[in-house]
Image (cartoon, rainbow, N blue to C red):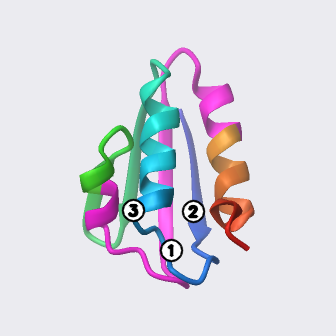
Amino acid sequence: MKTATYTVTNALGIHARPAADIARFVGKHKSEVTLTNGAKKANGKSVLMITALGAKKGAEVTVTVSGEDEEEVFTQLDDMFAHGFYEE
C-alpha cells in the first residue's frame, strides 16, 4: 500500500475533467485507489465520487493505492497531482 497527501494546486481544483482523467486512468488498472478530502472519501474509479469530494485549490487530498500494480498507478497519480492535472 502506498499513501501520499497532496495540496491541490490547479485553479479550479478537482473538477469534472481531472476527476474523469483520474477515474479513466485508475479504471484501467487492478489496484484499488481511495481519495480522501477531510471526512469525504472517493473510489478512484468513480468520476462522480471524485467530483463530490469538493477538493478546491489549496485542499489537501490523501491518495491511497493498494494492489498488484500499485507502483505504476501511484507514480502516475503522483505526477498528475504534482503538475496540477496538466492544467497549469
In the picture, the quarter occupied by the C terminus is: bottom right
Identify the mark nearer the N-term, 2 or 1. Answer: 2
Question: Which residues are the magenta region?
Answer: 50-75
Seen in the picture, residue 78 relative to 24 is either above or below; the reply is below
Identify the amino acid type marked 2.
Thr
Identify the amino acid type marked 1.
Glu
x then y, percent, for residue 11: 59, 84
Q: Residue at x 50, y 58 (%)?
A: 18
Q: Are marks 2 and 3 in contact (CB under 8 Å)?
A: no
Judged by depth in the image, the label closer to the viewer, 2 or 3, is 3
- Residue placed under numbered mark 2 in the picture: 5
Seen in the picture, residue 22 relative to 19 is either above or below; the reply is above
Seen in the picture, residue 51 relative to 7 is either above or below; the reply is above
Q: Residue at x 33, y 73 (%)?
A: 38
x then y, percent, for residue 78: 68, 50
x then y, percent, for residue 6: 60, 66
Measured Cα–Cα span from mark 2 to mark 3: 20 Å
SS label for mark 2: strand
Q: Residue at x 50, y 51 (%)?
A: 63
Identify the mark nearer the N-term, 2 or 3. Answer: 2
Q: Quadrant of residue 81?
A: bottom right
Q: Quadrant of residue 36?
A: bottom left
Residue 45 magenta-highlighted: no
- Residue placed under numbered mark 1 in the picture: 60
- Residue placed under numbered mark 3 in the picture: 16
Identify the amino acid type marked 3.
Ala
